[in-house]
Image: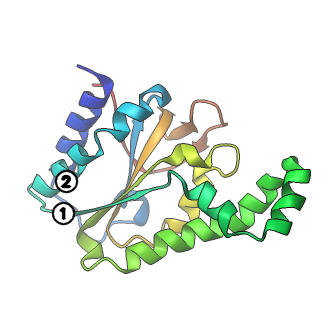
Amino acid sequence: MSRINQLLQNYRRHVSLPLRTNTASAQRIWFAVYPPDDERRLQHRLQEFELATRESPNRLSWHLIDLHGRLAEWFAAEDPEDLKTWFAHPEDIELYARSQWKDRLANIIKSEISALPDAERTVVALAGLMELFDFLEVSEVLETLERAVPGYLLLFFPGEREGNVYRFLCARDGWDYLAVPIVADR
C-alpha cells in the first residue's frame, strides 16, 4: 500500500472516531504527516480526504485552504519600491516574512474561517505548507491560528514526527507540539 493510501486510511479511521466536545485547541489540531517527496501525490488526493471527512459518521464539513501561490500574492501586493529594497538584500526578506507575511496569512486564514457557516463542525484543512519554507516556520503560523479555529484544523505536514517533535520537510529543527498525529505508516 502506498504511503498516501495508508495516510488516507489512517485519516478515515481517525475522523470516524467519536468526537469529544470541549477539548483543548491542541487536541483539535491534527497533523497528517507524510514524507515530503509525496507532496504531489498528496495534492492530487485532497478530494479523497474531503470525501472521507464528509462521509464519516461525524458528518463534518470540510474547508480547504491551500497556501500554494500565497507567497507570490504577498509579493504582488507589496509596493514595488519596497520589493526593490528587499531584493537588494535578500537575506532580509525572511525578516519581512516573519512579520508581514505571517500576519497576512493569518488574517486570510482567520477571515476564511470566520466566514464558515458551521465552523465548529468543520475540518479546516491547511495544505501547501511547502510555500512557507525558507520564510516562515509552520510553528509560527500555527501559533497565530491555534485559538482561531473553533472546529478542527488538519495540517498536511510534509516532514517527519518522532514522539511529539515535528520536523518540517525533514530539514528544520523540530519543535514539540501536542497535536494529534495521523501518519503515513501502519
From the top left corner, tell me how far across and down residue 169 is, in percent: 56, 34
Q: Looking at this view, is 97 or 140 the one in front?
A: 97
Residue 10 on image: x %, y % = 24, 37
Q: Is residue 137 above or below residue 41?
A: below
* Quarter of the rendering occupied by the N terminus: top left
| Whether residue 68 is visible | yes
In-image side of 33 versus 57 (left or right): right
Task: Please tell me the numbered disc located at residue 53.
Answer: 2
Q: Nearer the viewer, residue 60 or 72?
A: 72
Report the amino acid beneath label 1.
Answer: Leu
- Report, in whole angstroms, how far the alpha carbon at label 1 lies from the one at label 2: 6 Å
Is residue 99 shown left or right of residue 133?
right
Q: Secondary structure at mark 2?
A: helix
40 and 78: which is toward the camera: 78
Name the foreground residue: 77 vs 157: 77
Q: Quadrant of the C terminus?
A: top left
Which quadrant of the view contains residue 43?
Answer: top left
Q: Quadrant of residue 38?
A: top left
- Residue 124 percent location from the top left of the image: 35, 62
Q: Can see residue 147?
A: no
Q: Position of residue 176 (x, y in %)?
A: 57, 45
Q: Work out whether 42 lies above or below 114.
A: above
Q: Number of callouts in the render?
A: 2
Q: Is residue 130 left or right of residue 117?
A: right
Give, as a three-letter code, the residue at label 2.
Thr
Q: Are marks 1 and 2 in contact (CB under 8 Å)?
A: yes
Q: Which residue is mark 1?
A: 60
Which residue is at 70% across, 50% downward? 135
Q: Secondary structure at mark 1?
A: loop
Q: Residue at x 41, y 33 (%)?
A: 40
